[in-house]
Image: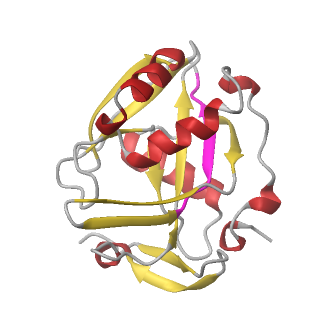
Amino acid sequence: MTEREFVVLLDLEGQPIGAADKATVHGATTPLHLAFSAYLFDDRGRFLLSRRAADKLTFPLVWTNSVCGHPGPGEPIDAAVRRRAALELGLPAIEGLRLVLPDFGYRASMAGVEEHELCPVFVGWLPEGAAPVPDPTEVAEVAWVAWDDHVCRVAAAPDDWSPWTVAQLAALAALGPDPRAWPEGDRDLLPPAARTP
């Protein structure tokens, strides 16, 4: 039996106001909740893309960033990134994980199901030789791409990508062309629910 997973519900200021079962929270009008996105690179500088599994409730079979997810109640957001990378992609180790977009948020719908998230964005690197082993219930397929090529492809055909990726890439581009040089985000700008004591 699969363990139930809960997401942190938020008010408009990002304060926690409760929790909801992840399996039931997404619908036509999804309440605001806490999430994250992560962009992972290998030791050769390639970016790891993932395509969401066909049975995902939100945005099935859509290409997106490396890994997305939701911290559970009381779970540090950095730990949630590592947990989901291991679960979805079989990647137990991420090096140099750092916050780059602390105050990113978005709202988007597909086929009558809405995502409504405050979704801080992280970047990290995989150890030499690390290879993803996707869980097919979460990820349909993965691909390695050059970062510059990826940015150009998304800009040229934004409808082919998850809406959060399109918006995040616009914000990441403002940080500069080299992901290794992106500055650390200010943790004081995280939603209060994502700040660890």
Magenta-drawn segment: 118-127
Examine the rendered structure and indicate whether residue 128 appears above or below residue 157. above
Quadrant of the snapshot with the C terminus = bottom right
Residue at image position (74%, 67%) is: 195
Point out the residue furthest to the front here.
156
Residue at image position (23%, 50%) is: 60
Q: Position of residue 186 (x, y in %)?
A: 81, 52
Closer to the camera in the image, 106 or 196: 106
Q: Is residue 185 magenta?
A: no
Question: Is 13 on the left-hand or right-hand side of 83?
Answer: right
Closer to the camera in the image, 99 or 175: 175
Q: Position of residue 9 (x, y in %)?
A: 52, 79
Examine the rendered structure and indicate whether residue 69 appears above or below residue 143. below
Quadrant of the snapshot with the N terminus = bottom left
Q: Is residue 122 magenta?
A: yes
What sort of colour scheme is used for the picture? secondary structure
Examine the rendered structure and indicate whether residue 65 appears above or below residue 30. above
Q: Position of residue 196 (x, y in %)?
A: 75, 67
Q: Tell me, yes or no, if residue 93 can be seen here.
A: no
Q: Tell me, yes or no, if residue 120 can be seen here.
A: yes
Point out the residue furthest to the top here.
44
Q: Position of residue 97 (x, y in %)?
A: 67, 40
Q: Toward which corner of the image does residue 13 lie, by quadrant?
A: bottom right
User: What secondary structure prevails in the magenta region?
Assistant: strand
Q: Toward which corner of the image does residue 67 lie, by quadrant?
A: top left
Residue at image position (45%, 37%) is: 66
Question: Is 195 on the left-hand or right-hand side of 39?
Answer: right
